[in-house]
Amino acid sequence: MLKATDPRCEYRTNPVGIPTGKPRFSWKIETDKKNVKQTAYSLELSQDKNFKDLVWASKKTASSNSQLVSFEGKILGSSTLFYWRVKVWSNQGEESPWCTASFETSLLTPKEWKAAFIAGEPKTAGKSSAGIAFRKEFSAAKTIKSARLYASAKGIYEAFCNGKRVGDQFLAPGFTEYKYRLLFQTYDLTKLIKKGANALGLQVGPGWYKGDMAGWLGKRNVFGKQTAIIAQLRLEYDDGSVEIVSSDKTWKTAPSPVLYSEIYHGEIYDATKEMKGWAEAGFDDKAWQPVLIESKDTSTLKPHDGLPVHEEEFFKAKAIFKTPGGDTVIDFGQNISGWVRFTAKGKAGDKIKIRHAETLDAQGNFYTANLRAAKQTIEYICKGEGIETYSPHFTFQGFRYIAIDSWPGTVSKENFEAVAIYSDMRRAGTFKCSYKKLNQFVSNVSWSMKDNFVDVPTDCPQRDERLGWTGDANIFSRAACLLMETAPFYKKWLRDLAASQRPDGKVPHVVPDVLITSNFDGHDIDAAGATAWADAAVGIPWNVYTYFADKDQLEEQYPSMKKWVDYIKGVAQGGLFNTGFHFGDWVALDAKEGSYYGATPNDLAATVYYAYSAELLSKAAAVLGKAEDAKKYAKLREEIGEAFAKEFFTPSGRIAARTQTACILALNFGLVPKAYKARTLQTLVDLLKENKNHLTTGFLGTPYVLKALEENGRSDLAYELLLKEDFPSWLYQVVKGATTIWEHWDGLKPDGTMWSPDMNSFNHYAYGAIADWVFSSVGGLDTDPAKPGFKGSIIKPNPGKEIKWAETKYVSGYGLVSVRWEIIKDKIKIDVEVPPNTTAKVVLPNAKPGSIGGVAFTKTALGTEAEIGSGAYSFSYPWPGK
């Protein structure tokens, strides 16, 4: 039976508060038949769940598209609940029943705000890190039909209604370019508000807005010196009337029990200062003060357009022990980003103090030197009223271990729970194989992604940094798209990237841009425009399009993409990007002693990325129907390639820079003239051999080395590098007990000593970027670039070395696509599942053309290939090619 399932609006299920009046709709198809394609759909939209009066109907539309289908009616109004339904027809003559869902629009224009920003501290309070509480009582005169709270803050806030915390989002309103974009959230309070007296409460902490940011530079108050909140409650009564309750001068304020809270440093909470019932009607607030009107300007307020940060996973304490240094330490077994929730019983005034760390040192002591200035400390003062439970409000930590410095009574494992927080992304890809250490590596990559995808894609979640470094995000984005459904996450962040882009086109090193100008190697520079970092403006939108077919997002980012490439073109000399500051092959092992800058020349690396961004921009232009731009940037890419060959290859074909990364970049990005390919590959092989087949690459070379080797006929060497367990290698970290990816190959050295604590994160996803190769080559599964968003899949396993089987799954917008291969004695068996409304190219390794598993395979440029429709398939044949 044919069915439409998993109906979603803007990537979400029955969302409340979508940020657009032109929504897009997606659905999957379920069927018990093979080779099923959607041939038509019908969409209907109504404010009536019985669909008696339609707002819009597509009628029966001939199309196979079931992802991000655009609403074509008039722009929808704000604060309105809509029901929508879809039915589909298939190529096998079936018609599905209706599949129904809903969505509700948010406040869509700034002018609809009646509220003001209100503050509880003066504009001179720039050094204050305390929390501030706000309250307002109101009366609901009639029976409530619906209640929606729209709220935001300059700082981090929590909202309460009638004594209950509302929503399940944390660290709201999120980290954005506040001067251009301050997001607000929508909360459904219908079940919390009753007829009669009610109360709203909000509390705010400094957060990213005015707190300590870029701690190693001593920066705070980057966006302002005064926290503030804004709230607008829309009450709709049964009789259709509407009442608005807004933040204004009638609200009252008082200090909250949060005495101190900073993103990097932690929180001090005094439970003796709690005000029981402060967010309930009838509370005595005579001691509270009138609020200050901070601003009535709502022009930067935008409805939340990303993913909420949730408490996602929970860990019990694995062990409790005393270190040689005397600390009482608890190990949760996994390096996470989040917080500890604890329960305690103490007398009023008893103090609890907890510190957080990623790792122990060689002697087994609690190690915090790599946190630099970040304190990562929680202090809690008991109120003495039985069992007390606490977790922080306006901060988060990166940790696996905690040290209990003070505690009332005996410390027990049962008192503690570690809570992992991250943006609420749908899980997309999974991989497992016969090689357990490789499975652990993929788990480590996944955890480093989750720990660093907390509203923005950060470099690390623990030290005094935690910023949206564009270079890290760029090189990892393909792997990220294979691990999670990242399109809505990136949409928010890329809007901030475009907002912070310099007028000349340069892209900041970090987004949101808290550096603005910074000091690198003793020079104050504009913290923008570095190769591979700034190229995030081009690379990430293209990867999002490739993996999710989000053409609208590509269209929105296109001006930003173009500005960056045009900037380079304007400063490039003779087709070479050889000006400005660059990080280059960051933290490569071939760097000079004490330096982070790898040996690969910056002008070579920068010109490679210039060529790549020009190529992607040309492709994006073609997708968007911008034919002249497509031609223009394709020609630019050709010119850059010619300039690169002339500058970086001798007439005899020797690459000018003899480093692993130089060879890898040139090979991977198609910048080696055909006549020089064999010699360049041999140079790379020789360089690896000189280092006993180990890498010396940094952030720029590492992501592409396995692909460069495989595509040039050296899969054997790619597998050898992948599965090495001694230093430096990916599995070296696994052998050393890592549960996340390290910033440095030698973060923890073979002799047990650490890399310099001035920059040594143990939770940095950059070197995990090769997870994309693990998925596509070891696992054998990737999207077909010609049919983006897994409308078409490429199934092309490349078995190698000791791995006997591998299984890769990906939940795309169309459904589950999977491949499992296993070598059993002298045969290989490959099982494939393709979701309805999609196809797959299957390329069988070492197979002869002919009928295999009932499918006709022919010889193509890719190998022994066939195209299949939806359904389950099994292919078995002699291995290797016998």
Image (tube, rainbow, N blue to C red):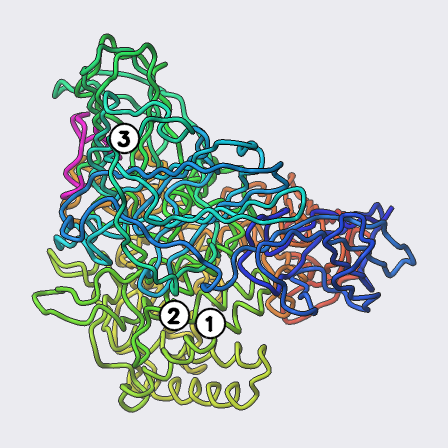
Residue 748: quarter of image: top left
Q: Which of 489 and 347 is in front in this view?
A: 347
As drawn, is 39 to the left or to the right of 385?
right
Q: Nearer the viewer, residue 868 or 646?
A: 868
- Residue in the picture at 87% in, 46% down: 1
Image mark for residue 286: 3
As drawn, is 868 to the left or to the right of 336?
right
Highlighted magenta segment, given as a residue range: 355-374
In the rendered structure, are the residues bearing label 2 and label 1 in contact, judged by CB atoms less than 8 Å apart? yes
Q: What element carries label 2?
A: helix
Question: Where does residue 177 sit, x and y in percent of width and height?
Answer: 33, 61
CA distance for labels 2 and 1 = 7 Å
Image vertical order of residue 216 relative to residue 144, above or below = below
- Residue in the picture at 74% in, 66% down: 858
Q: Which amino acid does label 3 sit on?
A: Lys
Would you say residue 87 is visible in this rendering?
yes
Looking at the image, tell me whether mark 3 or mark 2 is earlier in sequence order: 3
Q: What element carries label 3?
A: loop
Residue 503: quarter of image: bottom left
